[in-house]
Amino acid sequence: MNWLKFSSPQTFYPLAGKLVPWFAVAATVLTIYGLYLGLLIAPTDFQQGDSYRIIFVHVPASILSMFLYVVMAIYAALGISLNARLSYMMATSVAPTGAMFTFLALLTGSFWGKPTWGAWWVWDARITSELILLFLYIGYMSLQSAIDDKRRADRASAVLAIVGVINVPIIYFSVKWWNTLHQGSTINMGKSSTMAPIMLKAMLIMMVAFWLYSVAVILTRARREIEDRERNSEWIKQAWLQEVKE
Amino acid sequence: MYWHSLNDFLHMGGYALYVWVSFAVTFGSMAIELLLLRVRRLKGQKMMGGAIQ
Amino acid sequence: MTTATFNKISALTVLYRVFLRDIKVAWRRRSDIASVFFFFIIAASLFPLGLGADPKLLHAIAPSVLWVCALLSCMLSLPRIFAADYTDGTLEQLIIANQPTLLIVLMKTLAHWVLSGLPLVLVAPLIGLQFDLNVNELQVLALSLLIGTPTLSLIGSIGAALTLGVRGGGVLIALLILPLYIPTLVFGAGAVNAVSTGMSASGGLSLLGAMLALSLVFAPLAASVALKIAVE
């Protein structure tokens, strides 16, 4: 199958439209199953009590926040190297979801930290780096909205995304170094070393569920993005008329 | 089922506030994200309806 | 002279001229340079005014306060690297001309550092005295700024190039660049803090050096790509 033919907005648009419902349903089913296992079946944690259950949303959100940033940077790099409009649109579509998950990771982490270590916020390497990741997402979205010329906005923010992704490991390392220097929290951030298999299973299911959700949302946003940009072209008008008839 | 009663479940071993706020904000945010996309679709349709006229 | 040597000479001359021109143009607007310099001094004094004059407290916060103020004043002067040339069309000419944009960006960034970063290196130790820093700490402070401020100019040039002619430019640059400044800040202030607590500053200073090396290699490249995007 020639996948390359889907690299134009015109062919990608209907494909995305067909894929979204599948991902949406799968995400819903897995979320329900994951929550069922995590909230109803899994036993309580010996050390942390039931507050540990927050990991069923916290860990998936963190993982996705980082994963989506890399995805965004890859689309940005593809956009610049291939000069492909669709790549830029995908990068634009990923950002809001990535930012949301970053925010959720910080918030749920905070609510998990308070009962566990007594503090709403701790300046350890991972939390601080996650905060900076949120700033990077916000910077990307701000730059895009500040530039009126779409083409320039796409390309400038693509450069920013690539510069950002290179900096993420540097930032993480610097914060880690800063932490050891100041002998900061000696809190053991690692998940409890022995996680009951069912807890791990529920967490992994939620991770996949969040990923499926992301795909559905990002594909939908990409379609909205295509509609915005190609508003005046014939094919989108035809496609819309087609949909209205259905 | 780990829990013995609905009350126990809601109580979350004393951590109800932390657990339920976390879950509520998480799924609430996702709902808002979906809502915003829906609004965007409706706006787009309005504009396209105008363009086709 | 063969054509090859002739071209080599003229390339260096052009770069030197770019550097010199930027300095001259900025010098004509001395007040711009001076105001950013004074910003550093004023902003640094806000902290004692806000926190109280306890020498121990001031001594403890000094490295970070001075580094953050240096960082912020560097950032305030970033638009100057490209903005004036962008508005009058000179930038376009420089890019179209035969010299690699990369080197032009490097020269302009160097000019920015000489005018905005270097003065900070010289004046920060003086301000550090107000914060009760001792000689060792002042030395490391100056050294860390000497190595760190070029990095700030280099990374900053990327932000300046990306936001050329964009509305809300100044604050937008801050939003984009400050997260990228964090490693430099951490290593720089960390080096001085290390000396305060009796440890060696070599760790922080070497990391600063590594950041400078990395920025020297990558930042002009990113900035020239961003410039081409802005100009076309």
Image (cartoon, coloured by chain):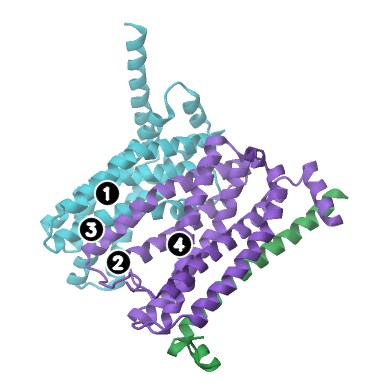
Disc 3, SS:
helix
Q: Nearer the viewer, mark 1 or mark 3?
A: 3
* Pointer 2 with pointer 1, Cβ within 8 A: no
Residue under disc 4 on the same chain as residue under disc 3: no
Amino acid beneath label 4: Ile
Which percent across, then down, holds residue A219? 64, 54
Palette colour of chain C: cyan
Figure chain in purple = A
Characterize the local packing of mark 2: few (<14), some (14-19) or many (20 or more) Cα atoms within 10 angstroms.
Answer: some
Amino acid beneath label 3: Gly
Mark 4 vs mark 1, CA separation in Å: 41 Å
Q: Is residue C40 visible?
A: no
| Side (left or right) of B32 relative to C44 | right
Residue matched to label 3: C190
Which percent across, then down, holds residue A186? 25, 72
Figure chain in green = B
Residue matched to label 4: A63
Mark 4 vs mark 3, CA separation in Å: 29 Å
